Image: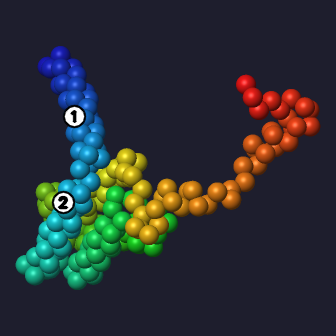
Amino acid sequence: MVFMFLVIAIAAVLQIALISIFIGAGVYYLAEFVEEHTILTKKVIKWTIHVVIICHIGLYLFDNVPLTLIAIGLLSHIIYYLLLTDFPHFNLTSLSFIMSIILLVGNHVLAFKYFRQRYSTLSEVISYFTVCLWTVPFMYLLSLSANDNTLPVTNVDDSVVTHYFTNRKRSYKIKNLFTYLGDLTGENNHSM
């Protein structure tokens, strides 16, 4: 029986390692998919927010979940919806982003208090946290890398190229310093 415990321990370590690799590969694939299909990702996040809002309303109507927990959940998902206006670009200092983080933490605190006060099975707790708390923030987390591969978008009247060529009043101080030092030493040779 001692050898069987050794086999069980080895199997558990292998299973944990393989599950970690598979989850990592899946997350990597999802991040690549999000980078390639940002418009589809925005639609998926939008519809997921709608489904989670319907789940919150259903939990309030049919399962007597407290109104404060439902209100914080609804408010956080409304804020998540506001983050879609600039998707896939995220401004980490914007009011909507900061509010979404604060509401996410507050929603977790209220959910922990609620599930600690009443008897709930593990599947109920995990299901609530997965669907109502983690799904949309996880989607936003996966889509953070999509911002790196998108082109800058501006208004039609304010083109990036036009702005660059009209704003040529920039002073390149390091270049000017080297030019000045070259002129002083007489080693500034403009023709090569």
Is 86 positioned to the left or the right of 159 in the image? left
Q: Residues within 10 Å of mark 1 (few under 14, many from 20)?
A: few
Who comes first in sequence, dot 1 or dot 2?
1
Residue for point 49% across, 56% down: 161
| Numbered circle sitting on residue 44 | 2
- Indicate whether 86 appears above or below 13: below
Q: Is residue 83 left or right of residue 174?
A: left
- Give the class, few, some or many, for how many residues have Cα within 10 Å of label 2's Cα (few <14, many ≥20): some
Residue 106 in view (yes/no): no
Residue reaching furthest front?
191
The type of residue carrying mark 2 is Val
* Up-down relation of residue 11 to residue 82 (above or below): above
Residue at 44 percent across and 69 percent down: it is 157
Which residue appears at 92% of the width and 32% of the height?
185
For disc 1, the marked residue is 22
Image x and y of residue 150, in percent: 37, 51
Asked if residue 185 can be seen in this view, the reply is yes
Question: Closest to the observer: 82 or 55?
Answer: 82
Q: Nearer the viewer, residue 159 or 112?
A: 159
Using the image, determine if residue 155 lies above or below residue 140. Answer: below
Left or right: where 161 falls relative to 120: right
Q: Quadrant of residue 82?
A: bottom left
Residue 89 left/right relative to 32? right
The one nearer the camera, 176 or 63, is 176
Residue 76, horizontal then vertical, whole percent: 31, 73
Identified by mark 1, the residue type is Phe
Q: CA–CA distance between discs 1 and 2? A: 23 Å
Name the residue nearer the viewer: 155 or 59. 155
Q: Name the image quarter holding the N terminus.
A: top left
User: Where's residue 95, x and y in %?
Assistant: 45, 73
